[in-house]
Amino acid sequence: MSEYSKPLPAVQPWSRPFWEGTRENRLLIQECKACGAKIFYPRKACPECWSAELGWSEACGRGKVYTFTVTLTGVEEKFAGDLPYVLAMIDLDEGIRMMGNVVECDPGDVEIGMEVEVVFERVTDEITLPKWRPFRG
């Protein structure tokens, strides 16, 4: 695997299951065992009821574009080779919102409400990033 030069997420003890899941091409989200809230980004306590009793479940990996931006210029040198790229907020079918890149399509084809599905990009031996592509059914 070639050396990855872009910033990497800081894996914390409470987010480790999420990153272990992505490495296995599985999208995991937290669930509060006390109130049932679905949670993303990984946290130490439920943002709804403050319970520390949190578990993990596998998301279906589908959602819709809530909003997005197409980045054309003005990025740090490490990202210049990716231009243009789409950064979107995705409303997952599970009712939570997640940020990520929309890939495998022309940036001009991305639109609000577009159905997407998760894909995974392994960038290091430890980190696999979830990204989104148009839903293929």
Image: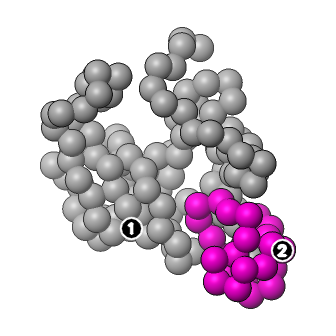
Q: Which mark is residue 53?
A: 2
Q: Which mark is residue 64?
A: 1
The spot of residue 80 in percent (x, y) is 26, 25
Q: Is residue 6 left or right of residue 122?
A: left
**Number of marks drawn:** 2
| In-front residue for pair 79/95 | 79
The amino acid beneath tag 2 is: Glu
**Local secondary structure at mark 1:** strand
**Local secondary structure at mark 2:** loop
The residue under the point 38% across, 46% down is: 101
The residue under the point 59% across, 14% down is: 1
- Which quarter of the figure has residue 29? bottom right
Q: Is residue 115 above or below residue 7?
A: below
Q: Is residue 95 left or right of residue 67?
A: right
In which quadrant of the rendered image does the C terminus lie?
Answer: bottom left
| In-front residue for pair 77/27 | 77
Q: Earlier in the sequence, mark 1 or mark 2?
A: 2
| In-front residue for pair 134/20 | 20
Asked if residue 13 shows in the view, the reply is yes
Is residue 56 magenta-colored?
yes
| In-front residue for pair 35/92 | 35
Residue extent of the magenta highlight:
33-57
Asked if residue 57 shows in the view, the reply is no
Please tell me whether mark 1 or mark 2 is closer to you in this view: 2
- Which quarter of the figure has residue 72? top left
- Which quarter of the figure has residue 36? bottom right
The spot of residue 98 in percent (x, y) is 48, 61
Dominant SS type (magenta): loop
Check disc 2: other Cα within 10 Å, few if <14, some if 14-19, many if 20+: few
Check disc 1: other Cα within 10 Å, few if <14, some if 14-19, many if 20+: many
Compute the Cα span from label 1 to label 2: 29 Å
The spot of residue 100 in percent (x, y) is 42, 50
